[in-house]
Amino acid sequence: MEYEAYYTSLWDQVQRPNEDERSYDEIHTKLTQFSAAIGSSNNAKGITREQWIDSLAVAASYAAPGFEWATSENRVLADRWIAEILTHLDIDTSDATLTLEIFQTICAKRVKPYFGSRSGGSQTSQQSYVLMGSGIGGGSKSLFSNSDRWRKQPQCIATFTWALHRIKDKDIAGSISYILPVILALVEDYESQVKVWGLRAALILLDRGDAEFLRKSGIASVVEKSTRDCLVFTSELGFGAELLKLGFGCAIRLAKIMYLQRDDAKYTAHWWKLTERVVADNMYIMDNVAANSALCEQIAPMCEALGPAIARYLRPLVGILTRNLQSPIYLSPPICQLHLVAMKQLEALISACPQRASLYSAEIVGALAFSWSGTHHKQSSGMSNIAQAQELVLSVLRQLIQISPDDVDTAVTRLYDARPGTFSEWKEMVPSSKHP
């Protein structure tokens, strides 16, 4: 098969939502034929630079993880194909860093035509950003065509994500007109899976883009507004935990980019809003272990940002963490992981506002007792993280002894009197055991 026809047929292989018509076995078989397709085109001498770049975009759509058609087997084959393409493009295969020209060529051919203004829904954020004289935004037409073709051919999203990972940091600002419309279209979509794809791309932009550029251009503000709905818990098709993790990941990075001065009232107000979102989401998560872990993980960054000001939400945050510690740690590895996460957040919370946290020392000791008792259950003997959980319990207990020795002493003594075999190690830690 002629090379261009070969990679074009592979590009057209993925279609949504015609899942019954897909054949990933056929994709895998086609991917094994890339060397033959290259050889058939006059031993690769008849392949133009434009075709090499275009085929790189196609191969990338099967090499990007996180997409159902990019199975582990397909990614291995796609990576081999990409390595051969990069050799012909004189690009180092060890890191596969793309030049600005190649990145923009890929986007212009295999991403841009599939995106554009969406029919229906809010488009205010896409119309409002200003790009340092780029002419995009402010009500002007988008650089991208007026279509939603990406919904039926989502491989363009995989190609975009793969290429965005490999562009040089310094070239991100110069390619923002190719990057931002795609991210906004995805994060503002109604499908949770699509939001996840968009948030992953947004994290690349926020982690690698120049913070000052993102702040002063207004891009950070636009992305912040577009990702707010991603902070609301949803149970749709099991995406709730990942959406929370990625959504808060973006929100935290954006807050660090947009608000630099701790003494600025806007700084504290913004971080308080994020903390309020954590408290609000907790009301809807219920017994979703993965979502509880994802949500609890956000408390430590809030403590780091707010310091003693986190005390405004101390009561509900303590309640969230102690409630999760009352689940039987020995039932499953995910629940054990939830305990680890919750105790790490307790450490951060106590460190941020120790005096206020001392008011809840007895409540926290009670929750730690549930976790500690569970680690001694016979079902926990084969779990790998039990020893780490016990170390964290003791670490939090030491913190509490430092800030509220009398209350902790009283609580531990009661526990020891009821179950001396389980809490003997605790009893040795409290002041009364050292000064009878």
Image (cartoon, rainbow, N blue to C red):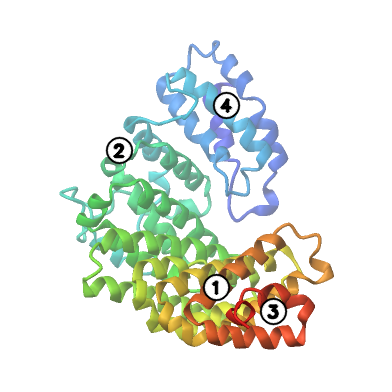
Q: Earlier in the sequence, mark 4 or mark 1?
A: 4
Q: What is the C-alpha distance between the residues marked 2 and 1?
A: 35 Å
- Tell which circle, 2 or 1, labels the residue nearer the N-terminal end: 2
Residue 378: where, in percent of width, then height? 84, 69
Query: Residue under circle 2?
Result: 171
- First of labels 3, 1 by sequence position: 1
Q: CA distance from mark 2 to mark 4?
A: 25 Å
Disc 4 residue type (three-letter): Trp
Residue 435 spot, x, y in % from top left: 59, 80
Q: Residue at x 39, y 81 (%)?
A: 311
Reading the image, the residue beneath label 3 is: 370
Which structural element holds mark 1?
loop
- Among the two numbered marks 2 and 3 on one chain, the one whose residue lies closer to the N terminus: 2
Vertical placement of residue 79 versus 322, above or below: above
Question: Which is more N-terminal, label 4 or label 2?
Answer: 4
Counting other residues with Cα less than 10 Å from the Cα at mark 2, is it few (<14), some (14-19), or many (20 or more)? Answer: some
Residue 243 drawn at (x, y percent): 52, 64
Q: Secondary structure at mark 3?
A: helix
Residue 191 in view in this figure: no
Instruction: In the rendered structure, find residue 234 and report the number of the disc placed on it.
Output: 1
